[in-house]
Amino acid sequence: MELSELKETWQRLEKALERGNRLSEEMLRRQKLDATQKCLRPLKLNQTFQILFGMFFIVLAALLWTTKPTAVSVILSGVTVQAYGIGCILTAGLVFSSLNRIDYAGPVVSAQTGLAKVRRAYGISVLVAGLSWWFLWIPVLMLLAGLAHVNLYAHAPSVVWIGIIIGVVGLSGMYWIYLYSVKSENMQLRRFVERATFGRGLTTALEQMDEIRNFEKETVG
């Protein structure tokens, strides 16, 4: 085989290898993107239930208004519960908006940026709809008592104050655990807290994007 023929053969092999790499990259990309979208389905379902959950508490507060409460503490409990219901709906809408803006057809960086925005939106949703229950059970209990024309704070103020203390201690403890996990070198702990905070689906989706990005870097390299 002459030198020119050897060069041509080598060039064909290089082109075939490049096509194979591009094909492998595209196949991996499609598989990971499909897996990412599947991972986010439970999050969408979760936010749908959160909207219904918020509507329930708005209706609960509306029932209180029909009793025409006069006690300030009962009125404040109704306002708090109604605000919670509205907050659940608004934060769920924020998550849905972030999910719908993810550009799966564009560069991986674009999809990663979109998922990061979803993560931030979901963090707000968790804070409003979930962690607030360290304190929210108090106005909910006061509201339920108010529906029976009972002023819980007037009859048992210690229940309210003890509940507030428990809420402060509990929420502070959870915040400390989260900060500790972020700074910790224990990857298993960080992964556990991350999934507990932001959900398995969203965390896995972010990991899928990281795998695609790393593969692309290795291919280019």
Image: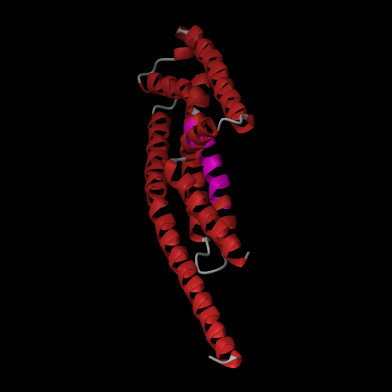
Residue 82 visible:
no
Q: Magenta segment, which residues? A: 117-130
Q: How many marks?
A: 0
User: What residue is shown at x 42% (from left), y 38% (from top)?
Assistant: 58
Q: Is residue 195 above or below residue 36?
A: above
- Residue 135 versus residue 122: which sits nearer the camera? 122
Left or right of 57? Residue 76 is right
Q: Nearer the viewer, residue 137 or 189?
A: 189
Residue 147 position within the rendered picture, expressed as x and y whole percent measured from the top left? 37, 23
**Does the magenta segment cover residue 168?**
no
- Considering depth in this image, is 175 or 68 the residue closer to the camera? 175
Q: Quadrant of the C terminus?
A: bottom right
Q: Main secondary structure of the magenta part?
A: helix
The one nearer the camera, 179 or 167, is 179
Residue 82 image point, x, y percent:
47, 35
Q: Quadrant of residue 151?
A: top left
Give me the residue at 47% from left, 23% from top: 139
Residue 157 placed where, x, y %?
50, 9
Left or right position of 195 against 63: right
Q: Is residue 130 above or below residue 6?
A: above
Identify which residue is drawn at 46% across, 68% down. 24
Residue 134 is at least partly visible in this image: yes
Residue 119 painted magenta: yes
In this rendering, the answer to whether 16 lies above or below 187 is: below
The residue lying at 38 percent from left, 39 percent from top is 53
Up the image or down, 213 lies above or below 150; here it is below
Percent x, y for residue 145? 39, 18
State the colouring used for the structure image: secondary structure
